[in-house]
Image (cartoon, rainbow, N blue to C red):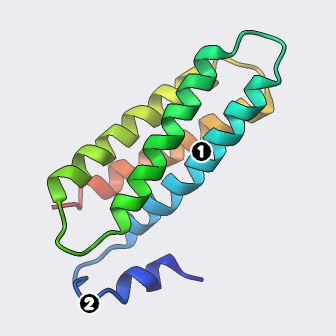
Amino acid sequence: MSLQKMIDAHPQVEDKTEDLVLAARHAMLCSLFCTSCADACVAEDMDMAQCIRNCLDCADVCAATARLAVRRTAQNIDVLRVQMEACIKACETCAAECEKHDNDHCTWCAKMCRECADDCRKALSQVK
């Protein structure tokens, strides 16, 4: 299945959407990575409360960002831009926290968060 083809089939989509679709895809993946990381943090022996909180916040923000990015009818560009900026901030915050911990799940989560933030930043420059 192709998210790009789904968006391109929308009757009100006339402009290029590749960067926005990639950002939406990575935001949804990032939401899943962060949810999984938070769950793994619960099982760690050390105090991971801040990491869990950042991961869960990031997961929610990323999921909302993905949903807003694929809605193309009667677009609300100002809200989409603010949401993407929030996603960038949540991903950067989560990545910075995860990078403080020496475990594989946090390493992978931080990497996904950085990729998501970069993709949102790139797409944001084209959302007008």
Quarter assignment of residue 39: top right
Q: Is residue 30 left or right of residue 104?
A: left
Q: CA distance from mark 2 to mark 1?
A: 32 Å
| Residue 9 point in image, percent of width and height | 37, 90
- What's the residue at 32%, 69% (across, down)? 71
Seen in the picture, residue 44 relative to 92 is either above or below; the reply is above
Q: Which quadrant of the figure has residue 42? A: top right
Residue type, mark 1 in image: Met
Q: Disc 2 on helix, strand or loop?
A: loop
Residue at the spot of label 1: 112
Residue drawn at the location 61% of the way across and 21% of the way down: 51
* Lower sequence index among marks 2 and 1: 2
| Residue placed most toward the observer, 128 or 54 | 54
Instruction: Tell me residue 23's x, y (percent).
Output: 43, 58
Nearer to us in this view, 26 or 42:
42
Q: Which residue is mark 2?
A: 11
21 horizontally vs 83: left or right: right
Q: Estimate how packed mark 2 is, as few (under 14), some (14 to 19) or many (20 or more) residues with alpha carbons within 10 Å.
A: few
**In this image, 84 relative to 34: left or right?**
left
Instruction: Tell me the kind of residue under disc 2.
Output: Pro
The residue positioned 38% from the left and 51% from the top of the image is: 120
Q: Which mark is residue 78?
A: none
Give the SS element for disc 1: helix
The outermost residue toward the top is: 47
Q: Nearer the viewer, residue 109 or 80?
A: 80
- The image quadrant of residue 70 is bottom left
Q: Is residue 12 above or below residue 99?
A: below
Of tags 2 and 1, the one toward the viewer is 2
Q: Taking 73 as reference, is 6 left or right?
A: right
